[in-house]
Amino acid sequence: MTDDNNKTRVVITGLGIVCPLGHNVEQVWQNILAGKSGVDKTTIFDASTFPTTFSAEVKNFDLSKHISKPQLHKHSARGSAFVLGATAQACRQAGIDIETDAPTDGIDRTKLGIYLGAGEGSVDNDIFFSAIAQGWNNAENKMDWEKWAKVSYSRMDPMHELEQEPNIPAAHLAMLTGARGPTRNCLTACAASTQALGEASMLIRRGDADIVIAGGAHSMIHPLGVTGFNRLTALSTRNDSPQTASRPFSATRDGFVIGEGAAILILESLESAKKRGAKILAELAGFGSTSDAFRVTDMHEDARGAIQAMKAAIVDAGLSIDDIDYVNTHGTSTAENDAIETKAIKAIFGNREKKICASSIKSIMGHLIGAAGAAEIVTCVMAIRDNIIPPTFNLNDPDPELDLDYVPNKPRKAKLNNIMKESFGFGGQNNVVIIKRYES
């Protein structure tokens, strides 16, 4: 079905999430509203000597409770396990059969696609580094392959090492669901899963797929991941107060809190959803994607790429700035991002800049890197359902230069029909989507 502009409408019929705040959508949403932080001391590895000793980990997740196919949950690394669990939730809500090898749900698998924004998987770091140490020949400045292989082959799961390929989580989802339509992955840093959702909607609009399982997965809480972000001075080092370390738009913000997890949304054409009798949760109405063409790590100081992407998404949705009720920000808690994002919002909304609400749930969930956008879009759907804006927590000392309504510390009741979700990634990637309340 199309709108007045002859554009196929793309609706959301399923949600799933596994993140530091919980292992299902309702649990995560209630923990956000209750202000229950997912940040604590890092336990995945010994980070006691690192500049940052805390993170937002997924705790006690058991994939076997979500799916029954042992060939998938036996070898899956963390990111893949999280996204398999999130996908199982979303598919069950949407009425997509993942239990049988010959599904009886009536869905044409050749028109069922997958699009993830998934990052590289984590290796078995203790084994990996031990193998390097034992295999490296300092005198000859080369690796002794036999010594390396003796350690790595005897102790490392080769399937886990395959997870270093970012497309592997998408391949796992194809095996789980039987999807034989377009199966894609993008890795545009912290904008990846928002881009995946936006481009998945384009697949549906073009008729390449009727349904797309879309979202993101990432797990970088390991020595290499944390070292990289520490060297970039991107992580908070507030080790004495982890749960208040992520403080977007605050005068005392000093970096983000690294997290991990996965989130999935089932996107499908309105025609497909109605034909199947699926419950429609919301509509993905607009998408804008741009590049700053500036620096690898910084947004352009004039916010030109962000502004362009925001405008494009609003136009694509057939809306005006007056129609946007709330902005779910990227809001990382870094000095540059929060300032430039605020500048972009002001440029877009003009006279409405002090009236528009804008908040960041990274303040309580942490930054899930490639999975962040999809996780936050899940909360946008829940915000529309309940007419509640999730707050920016830890905002007790606002930056006087950043003077928007960031909904500090407490959820706020508000009628929400149209939400703009922003994601910005290293490399100058800008991706914005518009989530609408569904109206037939």
Image (cartoon, helix red, strand yellow):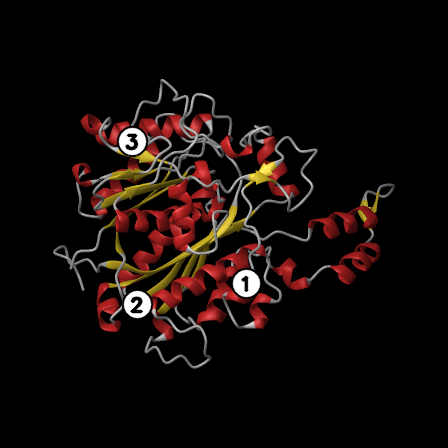
Residue carrying label 3? 345
On the image, the x and y values in percent for residue 117 come to 45, 52
What's the CA distance linking mark 1 and mark 2? 28 Å
**Amino acid on which disc 2 is placed:** Asp
On the image, the x and y values in percent for residue 276 come to 26, 72
Neighbours of disc 1 within 10 Å: few (<14), some (14-19), many (20+)? many
Q: Secondary structure at mark 3?
A: helix
Residue carrying label 2? 210
**Amino acid on which disc 3 is placed:** Ile
Q: Nearer the viewer, residue 356 or 271?
A: 356
Q: Residue furthest right?
A: 139
On the image, the x and y values in percent for residue 399 come to 39, 20
Neighbours of disc 2 within 10 Å: few (<14), some (14-19), many (20+)? many
In the image, residue 292 sits, relative to residue 439, either above or below, namely: above
The circle on residue 63 is 1
Comes first in the chain, label 3 or label 2:
2
